[in-house]
Amino acid sequence: MKKWFFCLSTILVLFIVGCKEDEPTIVPVPQQPTYKLTDFTPSLQCQPCHPQYYDEWSGSMHPYSTSDPIWRLANNSLQAHTNGALGKACFQCHSPIGWLTDTYKPSFEFSDLDPLVREGINCDFCHVLRPPFKTTNQQIEYTLQPGNIKYGTLSNPVANAAHENGFEPAYDRSEACRQCHDLILNGVPFEITFTEWQNSPWGAMSVECQKCHMQTYTGQAAVGGPVRNDLHRHTCAGADVAITDFPNRLEQKAEIDSFMKNSASLKLDVPTQANLPDSVPVHVTICNDKTGHNLPTSVFFNRQMWIEVTVWKGTDTVYRSGHLDANGDLMDKNSALRPNEDIDLALFNGTLYKDGHETGILVELDSVFNNTIPPFGSRKATYKFKATVTGNWNVKSRLLFRPFGPHLFRALNANEYVTELPIFEMEVDEKIIQIQ
């Protein structure tokens, strides 16, 4: 459902907007049983028996959750601002083992972390999680059973010498994603990807998250094991992509690109003919007809999914919306070069509010405006242009997406990563209008 987690979005918003004037109220962290690093198994120990799973996990956003430089920069900046009061809250999702074992530094370099903590959401952590899987209402709650029993979805696992096997059917259902992908903050449904799915027709039909994000294939769960046709991929692809050198980075980007191209539909409506003096209407309809949650989901207020429209004839372009400034930013309020210049921009994200005013102090929000598109919902945008000469004019519209805007990276002095932010083309349509 999402791969850059709650805390990254929290830090980015707190750091970028209003941090210096308002001291944020830090969300208290829940009390959990005390664990030791030795309670958990490094993922590398899984590789000899499960090379396919290990390779897929290694290139996913789950281990990237701690090595992500943007998260580290944002965390350290906010820790400095709050004099360390943020504590370990962000580690709850970015490195749950680091959080549960209290083996981390509030401000850190990646090299400071214990190798097991660097693994982020590692193999063993997920495979010792037990129900119930609850929506995180202010505080996350994990139920764990560390030990020699590793749980999975195979009801007839083959005995082996490495560990015991436990059958956990909940791993095959969306609820297993719920704790880190369904968040309520200050009573406000905030990052609620699970709830979006649960309230959708997909949820009603029990089309689980794993159907898309952990697709099944035929193969061997372990070396020498029987061939099975119901094994799950562990790439867990979603919307986010590694921006630094990372295993399977090109494959990850290609999988996300395929995801995006099968997420929504775009319909472009224009008249076939118009007269030269006319103001010609262009209608673009976006329908979320292929995705089990809102588009975009997760940290929707920082996501960028937008419509691009271009009208041209030869070298003469008479209309543009959804294009970027010289910094690579959309020309909305966040553009440093051309702020709010694109008055027709159709951007599907949202805004956070406190007492009716826009805020970036995430932990103090009391309401949100959410302009994302729910499953089987649609949004329509209307544009107008005037041609300069008669003839055939091209009208092209694209639905585009990127996980974050470059302005967020610049606010963290992370300019070197701006060029690594991909823009995915989700859908495109093109028409010709004859101007008489």
Image (spheres, rainbow, N blue to C red):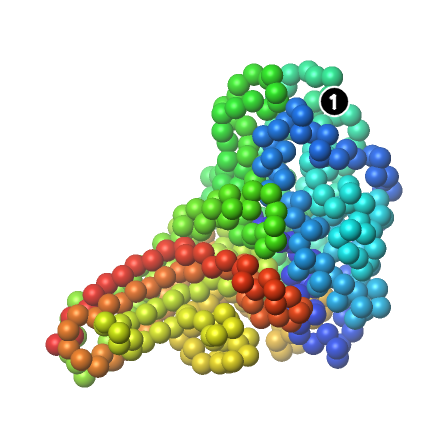
* Mark 1 closeness class: few <14, some 14–19, many ≥20 residues within 10 Å: few
Q: Position of residue 57 (x, y in %)?
A: 62, 38
Residue 26 visible in the snapshot = no
Mark 1 falls on what kind of element? loop
Residue 62 visible in the snapshot = yes
Type of amino acid at the residue the image marks with label 1? His
> Residue at (87%, 42%) from the top-left corner?
34
Instruction: Find disc 1 in the rendering and name its residue.
Output: 163
The quadrant where residue 272 appears: bottom left
Q: Position of residue 414 (x, y in %)?
A: 64, 66
Q: Is residue 8 above or below residue 18?
A: above
> Residue at (75%, 79%) from the top-left corner?
21
Q: Position of residue 66 (x, y in %)?
A: 71, 50
> Residue at (50%, 31%) from the top-left corner?
216
Which of the pair 185/382 is nearer the observer? Answer: 382
Q: Is residue 433 above or below residue 6?
A: below
> Residue at (71%, 35%) from the top-left corner?
43
Which of the pair 351/65 is nearer the observer? Answer: 65
Q: Residue furthest bottom?
A: 277
Which of the pair 66/84 is nearer the observer? Answer: 66
Quadrant of the drawing holding the C terminus:
bottom left
Left or right position of 264 against 179: left
Left or right position of 226 against 184: left
